[in-house]
Amino acid sequence: VGAVAAAMLAQATAEHLHDGAEAPVLVGTVFAYPTFSRPYIRDHEELQKLIASIEQPMLVMPVADDAQEVRSGGLIEQLHKAHGLNVEIVEFKAVHGFMTQGNI
């Protein structure tokens, strides 16, 4: 599985290298069941800085036990929309780890 993921990443990277660029062109950011809480994010100020640094459209996929900040109408959606960027929140009733536990 790791080799397949690495091959897919290599192909996706090659597809996004345009005009001799040395780095891929980012077209969006995806967070699957993001853990934007301690110890990863200390407070709302740090979360605001993180979200402000993302200048692409965003897809956020929180699960049942995620914080309100990552849910529809939460801090992440409010901040991203305030910067004029598209954001889509798709909430799942599952719990953390569901993406690695079979077909989705």
Image (cartoon, rainbow, N blue to C red):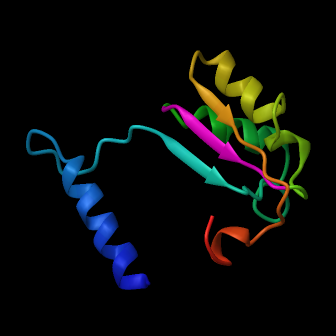
Residue shown at 33%/65% (left/top)? 9
Residue 41: quadrant of the picture: bottom right
> Is 90 left or right of 74, judged from the image as shown?
left
**Residue 29, how many percent across, how many down?**
52, 44
If the image is split into quadrants, where does the N terminus sit?
Answer: bottom left
Does residue 48 show up magenta in the picture?
Answer: no
Numbered range of the magenta stretch? 56-63
Residue 70 quadrant: top right
Q: Is residue 85 left or right of residue 37?
A: left
In the rendered image of this protein, does residue 57 appear above or below residue 67? above
Instruction: Say which of 35 and 44 sits in front.
Output: 35
Q: Residue 54's x, y, as percent? A: 54, 37
Q: What residue is rendered at 78% in x and 53% in y?
A: 36
> Which percent across, then down, holds residue 27?
39, 37
Residue shown at 56% from the left, 48% from the top: 30
Residue 94 x, y percent position in the rendering: 82, 62
Farthest-out residue, front = 103
Q: Is residue 62 magenta?
A: yes
